[in-house]
Image (cartoon, grey):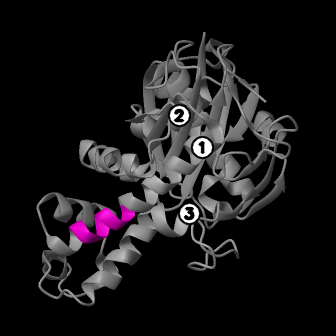
Amino acid sequence: MYNVGIDLGGTNIATGIITETGEMICSRSSFTQSGQSYETILHQIAGEVSALLRDAGLDPSAISSVGIGIPGVVNAKAGTVIQCTNLRWYKKPVQSDLESLIHLPVRIENDANLAALAEYMAGAARGVSSCILLTLGTGIGGAIIENGHILTGKSGQAGEFGHMTLVADGIPCACGRFGCMEQYCSATALIRMARQILGQRPDSTLVTLTRGDLTALTAKMIIDAARDGDSAARTTFDRFTHYLAIVLDSLTNLLDPEMILLGGGISSAGSFLLDAVLREFPRFEHGSPRPVPRIALASLRNHAGIIGAGLLSAQGCSFA
């Protein structure tokens, strides 16, 4: 038997056929009709599941369950989405509504929790007892695994590291708070930092690349330029990794994990990001005798959400 994993994003709906051991044997992706109604998007998801089964040459009877990762706050036990801002979903019974469309058992969970589940069951965290996953993208997601349990907290919001206060009275955040980690360690933050620095550094290759239009900057452009030795880009990147190392130090003090994984779009910088963080992290040790976690890159990349969703019914990890 197989499972279907669905990674629902504001931009794409990615689906895959997942084995019980976490192997993905078939996948597909389409643009999310994010401007459309809740009902329209659910029908789109149902259509993607049908198309995926056709692509794989499978009958629905070969599927044990369908898991779906939601980029928002989820009550997994009730099968409801409490809040998914990107899709403007509030208090939606996604599990029961989708089951009525596809006639298969459905489970839902927060997407970062599912990415952590995938890494724990079939990726870089396989075999460890405790792990933190940070997903560094447009925003920041996170998840905590402790002794085989993904910690969800009382209301399902444990691991929302992006909205921990990093700088008191710092930069305003879209959540209404100030100084959130997301304003210093996300791709959006990296771009904002670069624009501030480039205002004083017109000689940077980034100014040339964007023809002076700094609204065209991307995180990848900044990281590539930093890797190639551009001074302004490197200053930006060093500031970014300094803040990230502070966060990793705080999480280590709080949770004492065996491993911390870095995922999300920023992690595509690979060893350039990891090496920079590993250089910066010891600055906060101050001779402390505490054990230091292994810091590594998440290994499943863009497939983590799909694989984790497909593994929701697996027995190797539970939610607490």
Q: CA distance from mark 2 to mark 1?
A: 9 Å
Residue that badge 1 annotates: 253
Q: Position of residue 320 (x, y in %)?
A: 79, 30
Residue bounds of the magenta highlight: 234-240
Q: Which secondary structure type mostly characterizes the magenta part of the structure?
A: helix
Residue 310, picture quadrant: top right
Task: Tell me if residue 104 is in the magenta stretch.
Answer: no
Q: Position of residue 103 (x, y in %)?
A: 76, 28
Residue at left offset 38%, top offset 46%: 282
Q: Nearer the viewer, mark 1 or mark 3?
A: 1
Q: CA distance from mark 1 to mark 3?
A: 16 Å
Q: Nearer the viewer, mark 2 or mark 3?
A: 2
Task: Tell me if residue 239 is in the magenta stretch.
Answer: yes
Query: In the rendered image, which quarter contains the N terminus?
Result: top right
Earlier-in-chain disc, 1 versus 3: 3
- Is 20 displayed left or right of 70 in the figure? left
Residue that badge 2 annotates: 290
Question: Mark 2 near mark 1, Cβ–Cβ under 8 Å?
Answer: yes
Q: Using the rendered image of the protein, determine whether residue 53 is visible from the camera's viewpoint.
A: no
Question: Label 1 is placed on what type of residue?
Answer: Asn
- As drawn, the label of residue 181 is 3
Q: Position of residue 194 (x, y in %)?
A: 32, 76
Q: Is residue 280 above or below residue 22?
A: below
- As drawn, the label of residue 309 is none
- Is 62 displayed left or right of 89 in the figure? left
Circle 1: element type: helix
Residue at left offset 53%, top offset 61%: 139
